[in-house]
Image (spheres, rainbow, N blue to C red):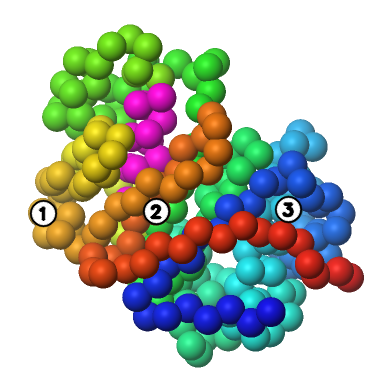
């Protein structure tokens, strides 16, 4: 099935990794991707990598009209992935995976996406001062104790999606920009490094299921966010 992406649309694909056998997708990966998958020590990590990267290829093939294994990828200067073949028409995509969920966002404009599993064994209180701006940390410290864990992961997905959208990755100083902790109104409040950046972007929360949080950041404008569910239909 060929997918059409209108100029003002963003398609966000949800992948439930638990539903797929990585062996049915492994052959789609490039030799470099296959080698990386095989280097993971734990089977769950190999599965997560294989399924999510195989899903990227299958999904993009629906828009590009070529076989999944023929798509070629490269990276920008700070490591953000991009499609190098085919190069016309240009599409932007971004991938994130955590636990048993993966999110893949596709747009005609730069895009960033992040999904995080809410983990009870994660020391979020110790990490908070290292990733939050002073404004974020002040808001975070005012929260009731039972809300801090989920709000930490909410903010983490928002910050990750933002730095991926602008193409900087974790080289960007996380304490130098502020994002709203409001669950219903995600917003980039300020960026001390690049003050003009916040007005270029808008942020959306994506429903990815219980105990997971997801965020997509796309260019400012009247975009329509469409959530898609990935179902494997390609066979070898």
Residue at which label 1 appears: 195
The residue at 33%/42% (across/down) is 159
Q: Is residue 161 within the magenta segment?
A: yes
Residue at which label 2 appears: 216
Q: Viewer-proximal residue, 137 or 101?
A: 101
Compared across the picture, whether 81 is left or right of 147 comes to right
Residue 81 visible to the viewer = yes
Label 2 – label 3 distance at C-alpha: 22 Å
The residue at 53%/81% (across/down) is 4
Which numbered disc, 2 or 3, marks the residue closer to the eye? 2
| Above-or-below relation of 159 to 128 | below
Q: Earlier in the sequence, mark 2 or mark 1?
A: 1
Q: Earlier in the sequence, mark 2 or mark 3?
A: 3
Label 1 – label 3 distance at C-alpha: 38 Å
Compared across the picture, whether 110 is left or right of 94 comes to left
Q: Earlier in the sequence, mark 1 or mark 3?
A: 3
Q: Residues within 10 Å of mark 1 (few under 14, many from 20)?
A: few
């Amino acid at each position: 099935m060929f997918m059409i992406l209108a100029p003002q649309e963003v398609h966000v694909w949800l992948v439930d990794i638990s539903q797929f056998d990585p062996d049915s997708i492994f052959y789609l990966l490039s030799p470099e991707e296959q080698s990386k998958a095989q280097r993971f020590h734990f089977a769950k990590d190999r599965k997560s990598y294989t399924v999510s990267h195989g899903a990227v290829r299958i999904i993009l093939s629906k828009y590009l009209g070529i076989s999944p294994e023929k798509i070629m990828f490269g990276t920008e200067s700070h490591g953000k992935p991009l499609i190098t073949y085919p190069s016309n028409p240009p599409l932007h995509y971004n991938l994130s995976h955590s636990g048993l969920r993966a999110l893949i966002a596709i747009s005609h404009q730069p895009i960033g996406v992040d999904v995080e599993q809410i983990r009870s064994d994660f020391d979020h209180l110790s990490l908070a001062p290292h990733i939050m701006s002073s404004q974020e940390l002040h808001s975070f410290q005012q929260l009731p104790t039972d809300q801090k864990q989920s709000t930490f992961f909410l903010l983490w997905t928002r910050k990750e999606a933002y730095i991926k959208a602008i193409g900087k990755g974790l080289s960007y100083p996380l304490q130098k920009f502020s994002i709203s902790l409001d669950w219903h109104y995600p917003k980039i409040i300020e960026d001390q490094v690049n003050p003009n950046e916040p007005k270029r972007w808008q942020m959306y929360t994506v429903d990815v299921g219980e105990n997971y949080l997801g965020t997509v950041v796309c260019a400012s404008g009247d975009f329509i966010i469409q959530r898609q569910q990935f179902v494997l239909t390609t066979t070898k």
